[in-house]
Each structure stands twice: as C-alpha cells, then as structure tokens.
Image (cartoon, rainbow, N blue to C red):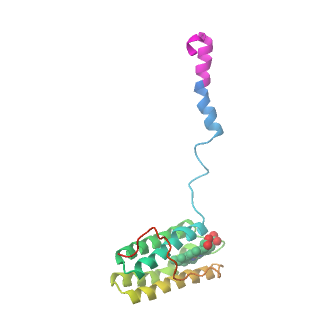
Amino acid sequence: MAATLGGAAAAALAAALLVAPATASAKTPMVGPGPYVPGLGAMMLGPIQGRHAKLWFAGNAGNWELAAYELDELQESLEGAGKFHKGFKGKPVGPMIKSMTEEPFKLVDKAIAAKNKADFVAAYDKVSEACTSCHAAAGFPYIVIQRPSDPWFSDMKFSK
Ligand code: HEC
C-alpha cells in the first residue's frame, strides 16, 4: 500500500507517524504522581502485622534462625513507617515508635540469641503491649495487638 503513495503523501504519512508517539505520551503520561508511599495504616496492616505474626510462629516453634530474621524485618518495617510518617494526625509517630518499641525488641533479641522459649514468649507479649500502647497514645485505643492463634501464612513453614 505504502509503495503506491506519491512522494508528498508518503512524507505526510511519515510525519504523522513521527508525531504520533509524542501525542500519545501527552495523553498518557508515563510518569505517575510521584513515588508510591503506602499510608501508615497500610504499612501496619501489611508488613508490620504480618511480621509480628510470623515472629510468633517462628519463635513458638523454636525456629530461632527464622525468628531472628522476622524480628529484623519487623523492626525495619516499623522504622520505615516512622520515617515515612514522622507525624500522623498531629502525633509524632516516628519518635513514638522508636521510644515505645526499642526496649521490648531488645528483650526479644536476647531471648532469641539465648534460644529461650519462656523468655521469648514473655518478651513477645511485651512487644504486643508496646504496639497496643502506641495505638492508644496515637488515638486508636481499639487497635489491640495480641499473640496470633490461627495458623496464618500456612504456605510458609515455621517449624524446623
Ligand atoms: C506510633 C506508634 C505505633 C506503634 C509502635 C505501632 N503502631 Fe500500629 N498503628 C499506629 C497508628 C497511628 C495506626 C492507625 C493508622 C491509620 O489509621 O492510618 C496503627 C494501626 C495499626 C493496625 C490497624 C491496621 C488495619 O487496617 O487494621 C494494625 C494491625 C497495627 N497498627 C499493628 C501494629 C503492630 C503489630 C505493632 C507492633 C509490632 C504496631 N502496630 C505498632 C501506630 C503505631
């Protein structure tokens, strides 16, 4: 078909083809509104609540290597939440996270290093209490955190 076009028509077609991508990209921008930062609630519901539960299943099964890993990930997730949401509805969420969870996390870390199940359980409950206390201090007293009982994440092996 193109071979039958005259010189001028072919040039016009070529020009139209060259212009087309620019027009399309103006209508459909390739760049979104900015980097995606999940809201604080999404971070809590996702990585934080999930890893809090996984930490329990690993520690309760005496899988200390996995428990150490989940503890690390949980701390990282909370730190991330604090960095991206330093202030939330007028509350200094970033500093609150650090000051309220630092001590109980150290206790869990110690219990895991000592492979001590009783200490792990006690320290884990302290972490959950810290989560709940922070919720209350931030204006969400009805978000209460406890040991998980149901076998969440049954597609992951927690026992050794
Ligand atoms: C600043 C202190 C603070 C700490 C520490 C904290 N949270 Fe939160 N959490 C919040 C705030 C604020 C919200 C409400 C966020 C919102 O509504 O957008 C929240 C919400 C939640 C929710 C509700 C999410 C939903 O959609 O149901 C869960 C679950 C949660 N946190 C789990 C945890 C766990 C588990 C820990 C401890 C390992 C923890 N949080 C530690 C401040 C904290």
Q: What residue sits 41% from the left and 74% below the top?
A: 158
- Where residue 70 appears, as percent x and y from the top left, is 42, 73
- Decide: is 11 above or below 48: above
Location of the C terminus by quadrant is bottom left
**Residue closer to the observer: 37 or 119:** 119
Q: What residue sits 45% from the left and 89% below the top?
A: 122
- Check if residue 36 falls in the magenta segment: no
The residue at the far left in this view is: 114
- Where residue 84 appears, as percent x and y from the top left, is 55, 65
**Residue closer to the observer: 125 or 94:** 125
Q: Which residues are magenta?
A: 1-16
- Where residue 82 appears, as percent x and y from the top left, is 54, 70
- Check if residue 4 falls in the magenta segment: yes
Q: What residue sits 52% from the left and 78% below the top?
A: 150
- Where residue 96 appears, as percent x and y from the top left, is 55, 78
Q: Main secondary structure of the magenta part?
A: helix
The image quadrant in which ligand 1 is located: bottom right
Q: Quadrant of residue 60?
A: bottom left
Q: Quadrant of residue 20?
A: top right
